Amino acid sequence: MTRPIPATGTSFLADLDRVVVAGLGRSGRGAAALLAGRGVRFSVVDARAANLPRDARDILPADTEIVAQDAAAAHVAAAGLVVVSPGIDLRRQPWAQAAACGVPFMSELELAWRFVTSPLLAITGSNGKSTVTAMVGRLLAAAGADARVCGNIGTPLSAAVAGQREDTIFVVEVSSFQLEAVHGFRPDVAMLLNITPDHQNRYDKHADYLAAKEKIFARQGRGDRAILDLDDPAAAAVAKRLSKRRSGPALLPVSLRRPPAGGADGAWLADDTLILRHAGKTRRLLQRDELTLAGSHNVTNALAAALMVAAAGKEPDPSALAMFPPLPHRLETVARHHGVRYVNDSKATNVESARAALRAFACGRVLVILGGRDKGGDFASLVPDLRRQARAVYAMGEAGPAIAEALRPGLPGEMPVSVVPDLAAAVTAATAAANAGDVILLAPACASFDAYSDFTARGEHFRRLAGSPSPGEDHHGA
């Protein structure tokens, strides 16, 4: 039986015989620095124990014990608590064995939350969470708050908790991996944008992935707020479950199709106008075509961000919302040459996000680059969007042959599906085939780890391959 962890507070840390920080990536370093600053002794388990980067070693107290992961079974099994980074798969050894021995695990997110004394807003979803997190941070800053944007988007929460002020509001992007080992985590406002199949290489069943996402609401109660996109079937099902919970959070719906029932608070689209209702007051924010961001999914993102800011007690500025630019590697126009637009959506690491990217452009003008490392996606589900939006497909990397095999039976014979070895070959082939008015879109629907360290490295390579914009041509829009 797993040893219990108090739902709140940090005083129990001083009573533990051994605290282990698992993994010294970005989150692990944040957790280690936080523990060291509070005088908590801990050891570190990392696969790179013998060759830890200097920036990782520098944050550790001089007497910190560092154990190689492949030799850490007994060390971890004797721990009083293991603080895990999101990259740690608890199904693997030595973690699974330690869990079977009753060792409790706590995510870096949970640890850091226990040191938070300011309002905390948390955003999760399969797609769009980084954009909404950054957008909420921008809107809060425009409203005069000390908005601390952190979590899965970049800076760990554990590295952002120091020096909290009276006007501090934490805006935290939260992944399913981070939510796996939470216990008391209770955001003041929590958001679930959508749930689509993803990370099948981490979760044995889709239900396990959904359950991890839903933990963002697990500890919420009266006085808390839960924002959900009711146009997404999985998020709507979560909203229905939350509505039946006694003493649960107030539900704030988002929809492109309909306003909330009964005049309730929420955000929606009507006649191409973004509308917000909060505290009984209805406000028209802006027209859909005023948004810099392209695609219907970004209309949802803008509505969700505005609603979260209002739920945090601040007024969302429509001009700040309108001018919000695409984040790097998210429907980012990186070059234009001879009338051909090159769009980097390297962050489209699953099938549903690739579908959303395709829908953002004119029918029949997209040459799309797919591929990388397969995460278990249903590539055949891309066919309807490809038939409407694309005129050529380039399938690259490890998953290239499987993607081509899945797509060809459903696509018209005149639409070429080319298997290419890598991104450079894909860009070269697409450039040769493109005409003025076309879009060359990198929306891989796969992870990047077959050839790159992460989606950012893949996106930057695409940017270099696309080259500099032609003189006088704007490349900042999307």
Image (spheres, helix red, strand yellow):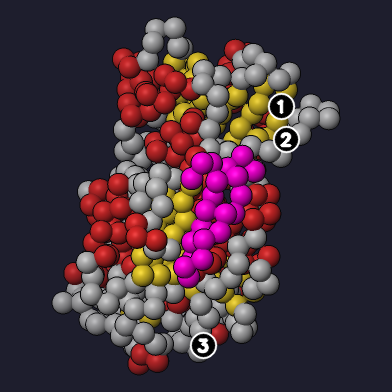
Instruction: Depth check: give the residue in front, 144 or 448.
Output: 144
**Does 285 appear in magenta?**
yes
Q: Secondary structure at mark 1?
A: strand
Q: Residue 149 in the image: x percent, y percent?
A: 58, 65
Mark 3 neighbour class, 10 Å CA radius: few under 14, some 14 to 19, many 20 or more: few
At x 27%, y 77%, the residue is 247
Q: Secondary structure at mark 2?
A: loop
Q: Residue 273 in the image: x percent, y percent?
A: 55, 46
Residue 247 showing in the rendered view? yes
Q: Are marks 3 and 1 in contact (CB under 8 Å)?
A: no
Q: Residue 312 in the image: x percent, y percent?
A: 52, 71
Disc 1 marks which amino acid? Arg
Residue reaching furthest top? 414
Q: Quadrant of residue 287?
A: top right
Q: Earlier in the sequence, mark 2 or mark 3?
A: 3
From mark 2 to mark 3, how far is it between C-alphas? 47 Å
**Does 288 appear in magenta?**
yes
Q: Are marks 2 and 1 in contact (CB under 8 Å)?
A: yes
Q: Which residue is mark 2?
A: 475
Disc 3 marks which amino acid? Arg
Q: Which residue is mark 1?
A: 336
From mark 2 to mark 1, how far is it between C-alphas? 7 Å
